[in-house]
Image: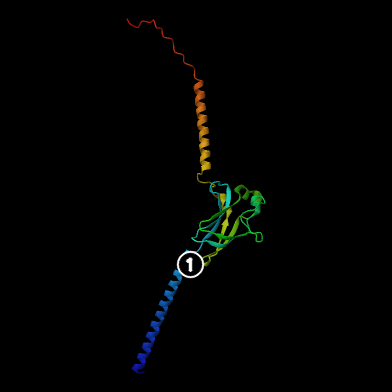
Amino acid sequence: MEISAIASISAATIALVALFFTWRQVRAADEQTEMQRQVRRDAVQPYVWADIRLHEQHGQFLMLVLKNEGPTVAKTVTLSFDPPLPQEWRQGRNVGPASSTRPGVAIFKALPPGRVMQWHLGVHTDVFSSENGTMPTRFTVTIEATGPSGPADTLTYEIDVGEYLSAAMTVPGTPLSIAKEIKDGTGLLSKALSTVASTISNLPTYVPEPVNANTDNTQ
């Protein structure tokens, strides 16, 4: 084989290798650009979540909470529970939001940033009553919404309210609980003062002996 042919083949090989690495660099740059675009899209998307939790002031109540944590308005928000929340929790009254045509599904036109919506689901003693022992306590939650960049990522997760059976149902101090503590403390103080007053009234009365003014103490 002539030297010129070998040189041509070598040059072609080098060119192909260079072309391959150039293609790799271009592809990596495209992927990086797409990732940055995705980050920007996600940064302006709403983030809507739902949970069943104890009332912040009255721990005996179970509440359904829906909130938009994102920076933009969430539109056409669909919240669904599978299976639907049992109506027996509130003795036949409506439990949480629901569509009249789609049980277990609620649709909201818009949720502005920071909006919190709550629904009273019932007292925990009714929810976990032995009479409702056949009622489901584990639900699959699905949330769909649309933001400025199009449909947000669909959230699907499981909520098990039965876990509250082993949790301490305590709540932080509230004006109502503080007022009750003050009232109870005032009652105990009043009772203690009454006991002291009663004890004093039962003590024997001390009558001092009269002093004779004519007694001459000088010798």
Place of residue 44 in the rendered image (x, y in percent of width and height, measured from the top left): 48, 64
Q: Is residue 69 positioned above or below 59 on the image? A: below
- Quarter holding the C terminus is top left
Q: Nearer the viewer, residue 39 or 86?
A: 39
**Closer to the camera in the image, 26 or 111:** 111
Residue occupying the point 43% across, 72% down: 33
In this rendering, does residue 48 appear at all?
yes
Q: Residue furthest bottom?
A: 2
* Residue 79 placement: quadrant: bottom right
Q: How many marks?
A: 1
- Residue 176 sits above or below residue 31 on the image: above
Task: Give 124 or 69, whichever is nearer the viewer.
Answer: 69
From this viewpoint, is residue 134 visible?
Answer: no
- Give whichever of 5, 91 is nearer the camera: 91
**Amino acid carrying mark 1 in the image:** Arg
Q: How is the image coloured?
A: rainbow
> What residue is shown at x 50% (from left), y 29% (from top)?
192
Classify residue 96 by image quadrant. Answer: bottom right
Identify the secondary structure beneath mark 1: helix
Q: In this view, does 59 lie above or below 47?
A: above
- Which residue is at 43% across, 76% downward? 27
- Image point (50%, 23%), residue name: 199
Q: In this view, does 132 lie above or below 156?
A: above
Q: Name the residue under label 1.
A: 41
The image shows residue 171 at horizontal and vertical percentages of 52, 46
